[in-house]
Amino acid sequence: MDVNVAAAAACAIAGLGVGLTASIAFRWSEREQGRGSNSGNGRRSSSASAVHAPLQEPALPPGVDTVLSVLRSCAIVLGEGDEVVKASSAAYSMGLVRGGAVAVEQMLALARATRRDGEIRQVELDVPRPGVARSGEPLSVSVRVAPLGSRLVLVLVEDLTERRRIEAVRRDFVANVSHELKTPVGALSLLSEAVADAADDPEAVQRFAGRMQIEATRLASLVQEIIDLSRVQDDRLLMDPEPVPVDELIAEAMDRCRQQAAAKQIHIAAGGIAGLHLFGDRGQLAAALGNLVENAVNYSPPRTRVAIATRRIASAAAIGEADGELIEISVTDQGIGISEKDRERIFERFYRVDPARSRATGGTGLGLSIVKHVAASHGGTVSVWSVEGQGSTFTVRLPAGQTPAPAASGDAAGTAHDESAHRSPFPDSPLPAPEARS
């Protein structure tokens, strides 16, 4: 009995040892499998992240970013998939890049061709203007495409729109000058032949001589206006301005047109504030105001009025400046008026509202262009109000000059000045005053 108990106890102890050993082995196996699974998951996770991670944009070569930031041209750098790696702000403002991609198909085609063969290409294109409507004249640009490293393509775009416009204006100016000069020169040549053929007819010689004088005057006027325009067309501010009395400018403009006005029975009246002064070039200001008054007389029917009015206004109300004052000079007529379509181009060189009437009055089409450039060179502006069949008002606003202190001349003189300081140029005219029209 004791032997059996001892054997049973030994078997129990052996079974307990086997159980513990198996348990320990199982736990160790689970732990090793857990480690292997974690390491495998880690490898698969890193592999998956490598697959799903976004492709990094190719880096620009050293120094390229700095160079692109100082270029005057619009710059775009494209990657291997035509994606925009780098673009200047001008590329977005010109509408060349939208939504991270190049919006002009011709530029993309050039970039792809350069990426294939590595050749530098340069072309000129017309691209739509930016904006929702994308209306108006297209932008003229010069596009240069070159490889940048082994994977990138550089696109440089230069806006040529303004240069093209200036070239077109220059071509038109040369063509118009040639045409305008050819007309009086040809007329003088024919008239001189007519005078030679009519040497035995005093009346014919006198008639042809009168025509020659008219054509010579027209030619001299055209040449002088071309000279005046060449002096002021840069719109540069004056270097040596001087005080110029506005009253003297008005008197000179009225004297210049007095003969033409008398022939058509047109009354020229001056009013507004007296004693005002401008600061600028007297000759240019006199030519500008004289052109306005001369146009008003030439384009007005007989027995009407032309009014010249002056006043002082705050510059903030006119051109948005914070301080200072402006002198406003308005020339109003009761003529044929200007249509809305013509008002947009009235200040262009050689542009005429009524070519037939201009040729009859000897107009050159340069007067209003000179007025615009003179106003710009003096830091001012010129504008026009007009209704067809009712008349026009041209208004020049220029910075005011310092008015000299008036000398004390007694109460009587002061009273007379006060009475004339705000005289109206429209005593009997049905037209509204220029202040209400401008």
Image (spheres, grey):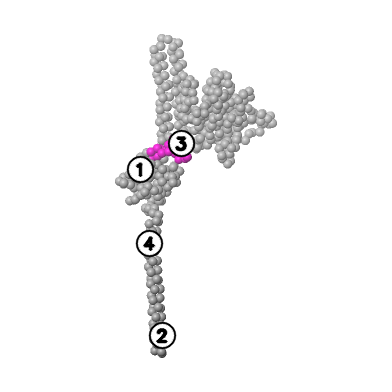
**Which of these two is toward me, 210 or 45?**
45
Q: Residue at x 39, y 48 (%)?
A: 83
Task: Give how far across and how far down residue 245 sits, in percent.
Answer: 57, 31
- The residue carrying mark 4 is 44
- Mark whose residue sits in front, 3 or 2: 2
Q: Main secondary structure of the magenta part?
A: loop
Q: Is residue 355 visible?
A: yes
Mark 3 → mark 2, Cα distance in angstroms? 105 Å
Q: Do callouts 2 and 4 mark residues in contact (Cβ within 8 Å)?
A: no
Whether residue 45 is situated above or below residue 300 in the rendered picture: below
Q: Residue at x 41, y 14 (%)?
A: 195
Q: Which mark is residue 9?
A: 2
Mark 3 → mark 4, Cα distance in angstroms? 55 Å
Residue extending furthest left?
117
For the magenta stretch, what is the residue range? 125-142
Give residue 415's quadrant in the image: top right
Instruction: Please name the amino acid that badge 1 sits on.
Output: Ala
- The residue carrying mark 3 is 135
Mark 4 → mark 1, Cα distance in angstroms? 41 Å
